[in-house]
Image (tube, helix red, strand yellow):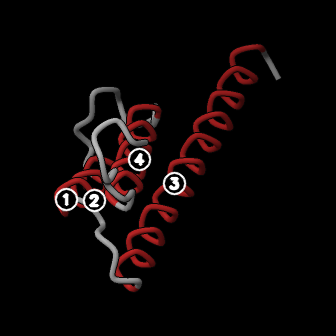
């Protein structure tokens, strides 16, 4: 094999690994929303959840689709938003 073939294979493997990570985050997002909803806890704004899923699925992104780093960032922000929605509010100002 020549060098260009090796580079192409390594790029394909890297893209597959990043896509796998994005899929794992998507599954975690769906499971987290389902378990929060089943427990009767707030899941945050509904548009955050569906917006993150649409951003992953739709081909129009900030970066081209073989690069899933922006998709991973959006999924992580959605998970963070859902987690923040379940935190209790402090009783007094200044309590954390």
> Image check: 28 left or right of 41?
right
Instruction: Answer above or below: position of 59 versus 32.
Output: above
What separation in Å lies between label 1 and label 2 (alpha carbons)? 7 Å
Element type at marker 4?
Answer: helix
Q: Nearer the viewer, residue 29 or 89?
A: 89
Q: Which mark is residue 49?
A: 2
Q: Which residue is mark 1?
A: 45
Do the residues under discs 1 and 2 have CB atoms within 8 angstroms?
A: yes
Do the residues under discs 2 and 4 have CB atoms within 8 angstroms?
A: no
The local crowd at label 4, few if under 14, some if 14 to 19, many if 20 or more residues have their Cα within 10 Å, is: few
Of the numbered discs 2 and 4, the one sitting upstream in the chain is: 2
Give percent across and percent down for residue 65: 38, 37
Residue drawn where x is 31% and y is 57% of the image: 85
Instruction: Answer above or below: position of 11 versus 4.
Output: below
Front of the two marks 1 and 3 = 1
Give percent across and percent down for residue 83: 41, 55
Q: Nearer the viewer, residue 93 or 52?
A: 93
What separation in Å lies between label 4 and label 1 (alpha carbons)? 12 Å
The local crowd at label 2, few if under 14, some if 14 to 19, many if 20 or more residues have their Cα within 10 Å, is: many
Q: Which residue is mark 4?
A: 80
Element type at marker 2?
Answer: helix
């Amino acid at each position: 094999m020549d060098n260009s073939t090796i580079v192409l294979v390594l790029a394909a493997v890297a893209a597959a690994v990043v896509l796998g990570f994005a899929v794992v985050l998507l599954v975690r997002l769906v499971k987290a929303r389902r378990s929060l909803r089943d427990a009767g806890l707030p899941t945050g704004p509904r548009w955050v959840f569906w917006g993150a899923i649409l951003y992953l699925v739709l081909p129009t992104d900030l970066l081209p689709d073989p690069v899933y780093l922006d998709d991973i960032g959006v999924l992580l922000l959605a998970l963070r938003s859902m987690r923040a929605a379940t935190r209790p509010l402090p009783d007094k100002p200044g309590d954390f």
